[in-house]
Image (cartoon, rainbow, N blue to C red):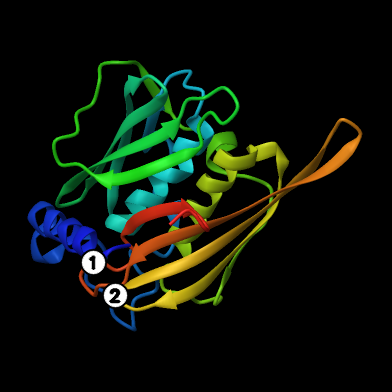
Amino acid sequence: MNTSLRLSSLLVLSTAFGLLAGCAAPTSESEPESPASSEEGLASSKVKLPKGDDCRDVLSPLALALADGAVGTSYTKSITVSLTSETDTRLYTVLVEGRDSSIQYEVELDNDSHSKCFIEGIRVEPKAKLSSEKRTATTNAERYISAPISVTPKNDDCASTVKLLAQAVAVSAVGAKFIERVDVTLVGETEDRDYVAHVDGKSFVANGRTFPNDYDFILNVSNDSAFKCFVQQVSIKGDD
């Protein structure tokens, strides 16, 4: 992520949260788990998605990843996702309500029939608004997948966040039913933390030929002490 974009993002976060934002919630060695240690801390009934939306199985883990990286799901009161525009892309507002603060994101997904729901972009947008559509709680089928997701190193500080983010990009790329496994590896740690998520999808046959269905994504999160694990960007590897 370029430095100017990163700095502007952190400025927005500082304004939204103050000095105790996001993963800066107090932690210590004696605590049993950190704020971002497990997405199980938030009940599915607290995650509301647009009713009948085609991309709910992408939006569910993606919204949880954003909340986990921002305030930790154990410190999240609710997550609301709203479809605000639908043209060649689908724009959503994700509102994360923490115990002491809230943050809004704008999420862009592809709306092409051949790549519908593919994640195109994520950004903090303080002015993002919710629309008035009907919303229902996420389901277990949308929230969880059966395929294994690994994170290396095993005890990575941002493992819970990048695991959710990897699930979201994998579902957006190949579909939940076609994921065989996802392997996430930390590849760089400076002011940001960069991970490669390798999505191993089931191969497919076309015109008598078998084709692989694999993708590599770059997952970029903050490594700043005040905003550690905050989700900043996802992209296909090589599309920089």
Asked if the residue under mark 1 is in contact with the one under mark 2, i.e. CB atoms within 8 Å, the reply is yes
Q: Work out which quarter of the rendered image holds the N terminus and state it.
A: bottom left
User: Which residue is depicted at the point 53% across and 64% down?
Assistant: 196
Q: Secondary structure at mark 2?
A: loop
Q: Secondary structure at mark 1?
A: helix
Q: Looking at the picture, how far across and down is residue 18, in whole percent?
A: 8, 60
- Determine which quarter of the picture holds residue 80: top left
- Residue for badge 1: 3
Q: Amino acid at mark 1?
A: Thr
Q: Is residue 101 left or right of residue 140?
A: left
Q: Work out which quarter of the rendered image holds the C terminus and state it.
A: bottom left
- Up/down of 99 relative to 81, above or below: below
User: Which residue is depicted at the point 8% across and 55% down?
Assistant: 15
Res 191 label: 2
Name the foreground residue: 162 vs 9.
9
- Residue 141 visible in this rendered orientation of the protein: yes
| Category of crowding for the residue at label 1, using alpha-carbon neighbours closer than 10 angstroms: few (below 14), some (14–19), many (at least 20) | few
Q: Looking at the picture, how far across and down is residue 91, in whole percent?
A: 34, 29
Q: Is residue 179 left or right of residue 171?
A: right
- Residue 43 visible in this rendered orientation of the protein: no
